[in-house]
Image: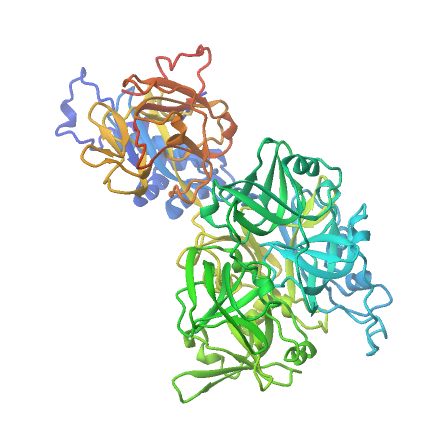
Amino acid sequence: MKKKIFVSIALLALLAACDDHYDDQFNIKPDITDVKDIAMTLETADYGTISKLSANQELALSKDPEGKTYVEALAEVGTNHYFTEEAPAEDYLPAYLKSKYPNADEGSRFVVTYKLFSPSEYMGDFKNLSAYDLTEDDYKTVWGDKVKASFLSPSTVSKIPGLLKAAVNNPAAGDMKVVNYAYSQTEPSIGGGGDGGDEPAPSYTSVADLLKLTSKGEYTSKGEVVAVNAKSFILKDETGLIRVYQGKLVTCSVGDVVEVSGEVELAKQGMNRFSSKSVFKVLERKEAFTYPDPQTMETADLVTYANAAVPAIQYVTYEGTLTKNSNNINIVLDGDNSVQGSITDALLVDDSWINQTVVVTGYLAGVSGSSAKYINTFATSIVVKGTANQVTPIGLIAYSPIGNYTVKGLVTAVHTKGFVMTDGTGDILVYKNALPDEKVGDMVQVVGTTEARNGLIQFTSTGLAVTSISEGSTIPNDMVPQVLSAAELNAYAAAPRFAYVSVEGTLTIEDSGKGYNYYNLAVEGVEKDLSLSYVDDSDVAASLNGKKVVMNGYLLGANKGGYIQVMLVSIKEAAAVAGLRSLASTRASSVSPTTSALYVYDGDNNAWKEYTTEEAKVAVVEPGVYESLGTDMIEEPETVLPAYLKQKYPYAAAESVVAVIYNEKANTPVVAEYTLGENWIETTSSRLVTTTFTQDAEGISAEASMYVNETFKKDLGSFTIQDVFMDGVSWVWKQDSYGYMKASAYIKATGNHQAESWLVSPVMNFKKSKEPELLFEHACRFRAENPADHLNVMVSVDYSGDVKTATWTALTVENWSDATDWTFVSNKIDLSAYNGQQVTIAFKYASTNEVAPTWEVKNVVVREKVEGESEGEEGGDAETPAE
């Protein structure tokens, strides 16, 4: 049913005197009709005009005469320059259109593009947001009578849901609590009740016993790291292997002996694993490390593994065709499509391997997927079949003699003389003796000779060859730093290793007199200062001299004097990042909170759980930040939050999104969404939406049954063109004089050209849609056997102006012309799967130097399904594309 907005008689009389581009409005002949067909986009000033129209103000007041809720919402349209649910465009644009075009007659049509307040869907999760500070009684509940500790540790953070369940009465599903608590990375002593007794030897649970668990719980285990990917590592003891999931890149190396403490969860197929709530600590290094002999698996063996009730982690080799789809790296097996290999959380994959038969060696670690099964593989080697592996795992170089090696990996840190790189098996310094061109996130190949320096193995600059493979990986952004005690730092010189660490100390900056500065970090309890090597002076503010700072960086061994050498990654004044140092905290000494986290109540399971979303990172501003500001609230979030996010995510990629929870008032948390452009800015929570309004005898109303109706007879209409790649052509899509949109990357003089160009619809609001459908006519020639190789109709629900940053799905186009003539054929595609969302349609053209089709498109309609229309008919009298 169409929603009608009527304009009062008094208003109509007033509007009749308005200018409508006529020379003499008072001598209009009654037989002249003025049927408008107008497409327009609202300007900033238009929103103010709309909010001030007396007809609109009367309408808003009529909805809520006492509370004036809708009056305020209408006023905000003028100040915010977008419509909202409380002030919808469908209600308030009719009066505006009537004021602008007072002489428009029945049959007039207005296609209006405007801004609609449209926050990210997940922002609706933040309901009943409030704060809860753990109490002394809470800490007593956690530790019992044996330990006196007013803080949580890695082994007890998982107790928070239980504490909330006891403390919060009658929570509703979706309720959220910002939990503030004191935190220590160090477990408390239980030997003398806090009186300084010796710490007892830790009790470790064997991997075999962890794998037998039937319910999750808190455990500590010890073993050797044998494989690492971008989010996990595999731990091995004498009884078995288990996956330790961290969700971020850990900087331990194969051969490290580590202690892991925290939650063990029950994963798919009974393959238990340490969860992301677990923490690890490197205890020592093995004197030698070698990979075991892999078991060769054929397709049938892999199918058996994928269908096993409880598969075990095992080291194997298998082959198949490597494919890449976004971040998914799969291995298609010969002879069975029900199972594929999957290179789990790959650190690096060379695009030259794509669509080639490769031999994969690594640890199988269970299966993901249901209808199709993907065998998770921690790859230790991938080579094109028939070629020898020239690449040495970085972690093995530490155990190998000095010599010439080839490695591939990601750059994770740089200084003015070189960079550190990792492939997951370990880290190595590439010493160039010159300012490197490489940046954090670059994938590179290094060929060179190793040497021993400061107790570690590194690449020397002599004969060094560095080749770029790709750029822009975000994996290094959230590396997990290790925390070393003063005793461990004192012992480091005797047994150095590569380690990414977070350290707090006092910084001194001294002019060397040689054109550069000395940077040293004095750490309490450590005998000798840490020396920051080859620092770019622009990375360290001179104002930090003499101040306590938090430094993240790589330990690069110790020189002959026993001074630990460090490659700086980031450095901030400790007071300014007090809330960012939970991983570097020493034992908490009081109940004052140092850490914050967000929890949500799961009504289905009657339990609290930590809140996460795939759509954004979630950052809770920690108590230390408020301490540094000298207040218990953030009064100027537009100033404080961008600085806070820059410190918290120093290597975030462009367009990263973070939901920031902060105190607008004391103990009154609110949420704001920020996006990274040149700087962190609060997300502009509006999108362009197009609605068609029509005029009949009753007035102007939104045409709810029609979302897009473009013939392309005259121009693009509400569509836009986005060229992604153009090689030798100046255009692909253009409006053809015969009345359709035409796409081609063929030039008579030079032939086919490679190009990618999109014809994009406006964003359509399907919030109230029921049975939306897409209709269009098209013809194409000079195409491939499969048209979808080059021509696709795409749909997105997150498009915000750039086709490259949106997520797109190809729609199934059933009818294509036979490529022998220019006969147009019709298509009708059901879009009801996208009900309730903001939807964009696009016609994507992608050609190559071999194939450059010509594609013609016209009469594009997105509408509600017409009742009674038989299959095969393409529209009725009122619903066919406008001429």
Residue 749 visible within the image: yes
Task: List x then y, in percent, for residue 612.
Answer: 61, 49
- Image check: 500 left or right of 545? right
Residue 2 visible within the image: no
The quarter in which the C terminus is drawn is top left
Which is more toward the observer, 218 or 873?
Answer: 218
In the rendered image, the vertical position of residue 46 relative to residue 742, given as above or below: below
Which is more toward the observer, 833 or 848?
Answer: 848
Which is more toward the observer, 68 or 253?
Answer: 253
In the rendered image, the vertical position of residue 261 relative to residue 809, given as above or below: below
Task: List x then y, in percent, for residue 498.
Answer: 59, 70
Task: List x then y, in percent, for residue 700.
Answer: 35, 25
Which is more toward the observer, 486 or 173?
Answer: 486
At 70% from the left and 79% from the top, the residue drawn is 487
In the rendered image, the vertical position of residue 128 relative to residue 9, given as above or below: below
Within the image, what quadrant is residue 442 found in?
bottom left
In the rendered image, the vertical position of residue 839 relative to residue 555, given as above or below: above
Task: List x then y, in percent, for residue 499.
Answer: 60, 69
**Colouring mode (rainbow / by chain / secondary structure / one colour):** rainbow
- Image check: 177 left or right of 452? right
